[in-house]
């Protein structure tokens, strides 16, 4: 039977070996995501988004940016719909409802993009991403001239735009990664 000190030494050795191995995979994922962000027009904003969501999503796969976009789009939808319900101004209420419907449709398109990425060997999700962008831009145009926008619908369009850039960059890389895996 091993003594208490031998058990502690064995545990310390296991941890000393396991921690660097797990860090190695994390560093590789971090490097890949850094490369992904460099393919967007707002790379520092992209890095901030990925860093703040590192533990929330499995970011070892570039496809996780679709999950990030879905979560952000749902968050925006919830906020805009809440402003529709809470607004006392009928004109704003109507605009927020229109935007909420657009974001709901955008969420459906993002879900379709995710399914395409999950099941298609060489995915082409540009149509889904373009549809999302059109829905978001429609909402942005709705509030373009509006000085009063407590729901930040106008700002949300710019915010989700970065996620769409990230998806486009990731989608462009997915087939290359799958081809490299086959070699």
Image: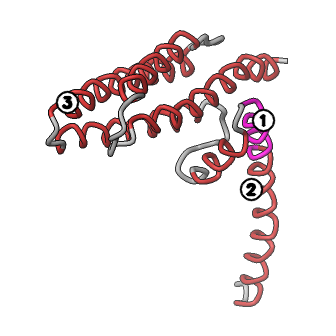
In contact (CB < 8 Å): disc 3 and disc 2 = no
Which label sits in the foreground, 1 or 2? 1
Which label sits in the foreground, 3 or 1? 3
Residue closest to the eye, 160 or 26: 160
Magenta-tinted stretch: 29-40
Circle 3 sits on which residue? 91
Which residue corresponds to the image point at 79% horizontal and 50% vertical from the top-left? 27
Circle 2 sits on which residue? 22
Q: Secondary structure at mark 3?
A: helix
Main structural element of the magenta stretch: helix, strand or loop?
helix
Name the quadrant of the C terminus.
Answer: top right
Residue closest to the eye, 68 or 14: 68
Residue 171 vs residue 157: left or right? right
Residue closest to the eye, 75 or 54: 75
Residue 156 vs residue 16: left or right? left
Circle 1 sits on which residue? 38
The total number of labels drawn is 3
Q: Secondary structure at mark 1?
A: helix
The mark nearer the N terminus, 1 or 2, is 2
The mark nearer the N terminus, 3 or 2, is 2
Which residue corresponds to the image point at 58% horizontal and 35% vertical from the top-left? 64
Residue 169's spot in the image, x, y percent?
69, 25
119 shown above or below 60: above
125 shown above or below 160: above
106 shown above or below 10: above
Q: CA distance from mark 3 to mark 1?
A: 41 Å
């Amino acid at each position: 039977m091993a003594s208490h000190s031998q058990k502690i030494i064995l545990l310390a050795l296991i941890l000393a070996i396991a921690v660097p191995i797990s860090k190695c995979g994390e560093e590789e994922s971090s490097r890949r995501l850094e490369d992904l962000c460099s393919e967007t027009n707002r790379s520092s904003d992209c890095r901030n988004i990925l860093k703040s969501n590192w533990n929330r999503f499995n970011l070892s796969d570039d496809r996780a940016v679709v999950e990030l976009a879905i979560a952000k789009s749902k968050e925006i939808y919830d906020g805009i719909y809440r402003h529709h319900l809470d607004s006392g101004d009928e004109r704003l209420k109507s605009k927020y409802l229109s935007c909420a419907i657009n974001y709901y449709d955008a969420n459906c398109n993002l879900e379709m993009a995710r399914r395409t990425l999950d099941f298609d060997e060489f995915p082409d999700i540009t149509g889904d991403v373009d549809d999302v962008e059109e829905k978001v831009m429609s909402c942005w145009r709705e509030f373009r001239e509006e000085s009063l926008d407590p729901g930040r619908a106008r700002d949300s369009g710019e915010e989700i735009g970065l996620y769409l850039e990230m998806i486009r960059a990731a989608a462009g890389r997915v087939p290359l990664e799958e081809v490299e895996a086959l070699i």
